[in-house]
Every structure is written in structure tokens, then in C-alpha cells.
């Protein structure tokens, strides 16, 4: 049976809808939701706090209790990529331990963690936590998966960078065993050079009020890359509902939908049902964003037009060597199935808007060196 892990919106009515889905399908189920508190949270996660559902310890306790009644588990995301080195001080370790014990008291049994140091702290409490290595750990090989397993993690989330490398996925699954999850609705660019730095930025903006400048920098640059070339949308490691069969054939039975930042504006139940049915007729990008409004300039990605896109990846192990300078497969596919005059117009308009509305570049242009005229004392 396929098990799906969904971003929590902390609404009981959503859990009710998941329960009804689980009853309606024999071969698929929502087995877990995941998330973290945003009120009174001292240790952050992998998402900017301003985009997450508002919930405190009391609300989390009630949500977990209701989830258990629906036979749906909950995993707590404490997966920042940076904790300002607090975890290497006696005071920081004491605070982290107290926080984790409080989570355990209100019913949290599973933790999703990125930092190895935090994994060790959680394991040292010996209070029954099941620890899952976050996708932020960037597990892209069997060796790395085994190293995290040796640390005592119960499960792991594969880095989306290898979503289309079926040889690597097979080796990771064989080496680690069960409890390996794959993110199906990835929206990150393949081999993004901003990725880890983006996670570090998010870690800094995941507890208190987010900074507008820092929160805009990476998303804008991701958008600039997307609209620079139409083929880039094909290089995002999403998985169509129809293509889940290739992953279950390798022994994967746990799939994750990301989207804690969009879950309140979207329809996660509708999204996961498409993966239950392994069928979807519409704009794939709507599905990837859980049917939440996503882009000012939208290029439609007709899911039906992508029916054969993954075929060479499946049939020819190592088909993608992740060197676009020597391969034009995605570019050729995009020209054939996606490009049109209307799409070109949208792409041009998007590039122009992004160039004109980049706050970081505006700040660079307006800020002289410290000590220079107009720089201000001590700038």
C-alpha cells in the first residue's frame, strides 16, 4: 500500500477528509502529517515562519490527539540547517532537551531532523523518539543513507536531486531498507547552487518575524532561472501521479508532498487524491503547489503532454548525467510540447518584471561602501 505524508494545516476538518479518503481507497492512505509550532518556537524548521499555519503547544497537543483518533500519525519538523551553534553549548543543549521533552509529553513520537548534532541530542534522551533524516540532509547515495542509519535514524527522505536516477534510488532503498520517503511534488531546480544557502536563510527566518529582503532573495533567483529557459521547468524533479508506478516497482511505498508554505492557501486533499489515483488531468504546476495560487506569470504545464517525458530515465539507467551542456533532451522536449508564442510572451514579461522588482539589486545600487559619501558613519 502507498503511504503518503502530508503538510499539516492543523485543521481537524482536513484530517476528517483524509480519513474519508483512506476509507475510499484500498491501496493508498494518508499515514502521516508533519509540521511544527510557530508560536513559542525557539529552534526553527525548514520554512519561513510567516508562511506557516499558526499553532502553539496547546494547539499541537489537540491536533495530535485528534490525528490519533483518525489513525493518522504526526511528525514534528525540527529541521533547520543552522542553529547559530547553540547546540554546541551547555545552555543550548539543555534548552533543546527541555523543548524535545515537552514535545514528547504532548504526544510527539517522530522527529524530522536535518542537523547531525541535533539527531545525537534527540537520541541521547532515550525517550522513544523515531528520528527521520530530513531531505535537507541531502542524501543522494547509498553510502550517505547508511551513515545516517548508523547514527540511529529510523527513516529518511531522499534528496529530490536523485528523483530521476533510478539506479541511485534502487541502491539507497536496498542499503537503508524500509522507511525511505520520496518527495513527489518538488519545486526546486535540479542541482540548484542556491539550495543549501537558501535553507540557511530559512533557518534564520523560521522562528521570529521574517526579514523581507532575505526572504525575497532566493525565491526571486529561482524564478529568474525558471523563466530564463522554458526547459528549466522540466528539470525540476517533480513526479507525476501516473509515474508513481516506477517508484513502487523499486520497493518505495512512502511518498511525501511538500508544501507547508502553501497548505493554507491550497487544497492538499485534492492534491493527494491525484496521487492516490495515479492520474491527473490539468496543469501539473497547480498540483505541485497543492492548488494554491503560485505565480504572477504562469506557464501552463499540461500533465498529459508529459506522459512520455520520464520514459528514457526509466529504461536507460544513467540516462541523465546531470550535465546539460552535453545533453538537449529537456530543451528538445520543451520546444516540441510546451513552446508557443503565448508562452514566449509570458516568459519575456516575467523576466522583465523580475529584473525590475528585485529588492536586493535595488539595495546594492543604492548603498555605497561604508565610509563613502552617503554611506553613513559605521555603515
Image: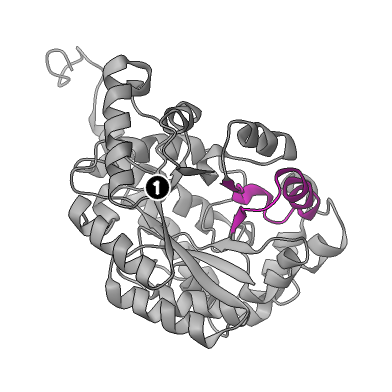
Category of crowding for the residue at label 1, using alpha-carbon neighbours closer than 10 angstroms: few (below 14), some (14–19), many (at least 20):
many
Marker count (numbered):
1
Indicate whether residue 167 is drawn in magenta. Answer: yes
Q: If the image is split into quadrants, where does the C terminus sit?
A: top left
| Residue at the front extreme, as displayed | 127
Location of residue 46 in the rendering, given as x and y in whole percent from the top left corner: 40, 45
> 54 and 163: which one is in front?
54
Left or right: 344 as drawn, with respect to 162: left
Residue at figure coordinates x 87%, y 59% from the top left: 316
Measured from the top left, where is residue 34 in percent x and y? 40, 57
In the rendered image, residue 238 lying in the magenta stretch gets the answer no
Residue 244 to residue 77: above or below: below
**Which residue corresponds to the image point at 58% horizontal and 62% vertical from the top-left?**
255
Q: Is residue 231 left or right of residue 66?
A: right
Question: As displayed, is residue 91 above or below residue 135?
Answer: above
- Residue 240 on image: x %, y %: 63, 71
Residue at image point 54% right, 46% down = 135
Residue 239 falls left or right of residue 170:
left
**Mark 1: secondary structure:** strand
Can the viewer see residue 309 in this picture?
yes
Give the residue displayed 43% in from the left and 39% down from the top. 199
Scheme of image coloration:
one colour
Quarter of the rendering containing residue 305? bottom right
Per the rendered image, the range of residues in magenta is 155-182
Where is mark 1, residue-wise? Answer: 77
- x then y, percent, for residue 23: 50, 84
Q: Reply above or below: 18 against 76.
A: below
Q: Can the viewer see residue 359 in this picture?
A: no
Q: Quadrant of the N terminus?
A: bottom right
- Residue 166 relative to residue 194: left or right: right
When the figure is inspected, residue 89 is found, relative to residue 311, above or below; the finding is above
> Quadrant of residue 277 in the image?
bottom right
Amino acid at each position: 500500500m502507498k503511504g503518503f505524508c502530508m503538510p499539516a494545516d492543523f485543521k481537524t476538518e482536513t484530517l476528517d477528509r483524509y480519513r474519508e479518503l483512506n476509507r475510499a481507497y484500498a491501496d493508498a492512505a494518508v499515514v502521516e502529517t508533519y509540521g511544527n509550532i510557530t508560536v513559542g518556537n525557539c529552534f526553527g524548521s525548514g520554512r519561513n515562519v510567516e508562511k506557516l499555519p499558526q499553532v502553539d503547544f496547546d494547539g499541537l497537543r489537540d491536533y495530535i490527539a485528534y490525528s490519533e483518533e483518525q489513525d493518522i500519525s504526526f511528525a514534528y519538523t525540527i529541521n533547520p540547517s543552522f542553529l547559530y551553534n547553540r547546540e554546541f553549548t551547555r545552555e543550548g543543549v539543555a534548552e533543546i532537551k527541555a523543548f524535545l521533552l515537552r514535545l514528547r509529553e504532548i504526544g510527539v513520537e517522530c522527529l524530522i531532523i536535518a542537523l547531525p548534532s541535533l539527531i545525537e541530542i534527540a537520541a541521547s534522551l532515550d525517550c522513544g523518539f523515531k528520528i527521520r533524516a530530513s531531505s535537507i540532509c541531502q542524501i543522494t547515495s547509498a553510502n550517505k543513507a547508511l551513515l545516517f542509519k548508523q547514527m540511529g535514524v529510523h527513516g529518511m527522505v531522499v534528496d529530490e536531486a536523485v528523483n530521476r536516477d533510478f539506479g541511485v534510488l534502487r541502491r539507497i532503498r536496498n542499503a537503508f531498507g524500509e522507511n525511505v520517503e520520496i518527495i513527489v511534488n518538488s519545486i526546486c531546480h535540479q542541482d540548484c547552487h542556491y539550495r543549501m544557502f537558501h535553507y540557511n536563510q530559512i533557518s534564520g527566518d523560521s522562528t521570529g518575524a521574517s526579514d523581507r529582503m532575505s526572504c525575497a532573495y532566493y525565491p526571486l533567483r529561482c524564478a529568474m532561472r525558471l523563466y530564463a529557459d522554458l526547459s528549466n521547468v522540466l528539470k525540476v524533479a517533480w513526479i507525476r501521479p501516473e509515474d508513481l508506478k516506477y517508484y513502487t516497482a523499486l520497493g518505495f511505498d512512502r511518498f511525501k508532498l511538500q508544501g507547508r508554505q502553501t497548505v493554507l492557501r491550497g487544497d492538499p486533499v485534492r492534491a493527494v487524491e491525484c496521487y492516490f489515483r495515479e492520474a491527473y488531468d490539468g496543469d501539473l504546476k497547480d498540483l505541485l503547489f497543492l492548488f494554491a495560487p503560485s505565480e504572477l506569470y504562469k506557464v501552463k504545464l499540461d500533465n498529459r503532454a508529459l506522459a512520455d517525458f520520464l520514459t528514457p530515465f526509466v529504461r536507460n539507467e544513467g540516462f541523465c548525467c546531470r550535465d546539460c551542456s552535453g545533453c538537449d533532451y529537456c530543451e528538445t522536449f520543451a520546444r516540441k510540447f510546451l513552446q508557443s508564442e503565448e508562452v514566449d510572451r509570458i516568459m519575456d514579461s516575467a523576466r522583465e518584471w523580475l529584473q525590475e522588482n528585485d529588492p536586493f539589486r535595488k539595495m546594492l545600487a543604492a548603498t555605497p561602501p561604508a565610509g563613502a559619501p552617503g554611506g553613513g558613519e559605521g555603515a
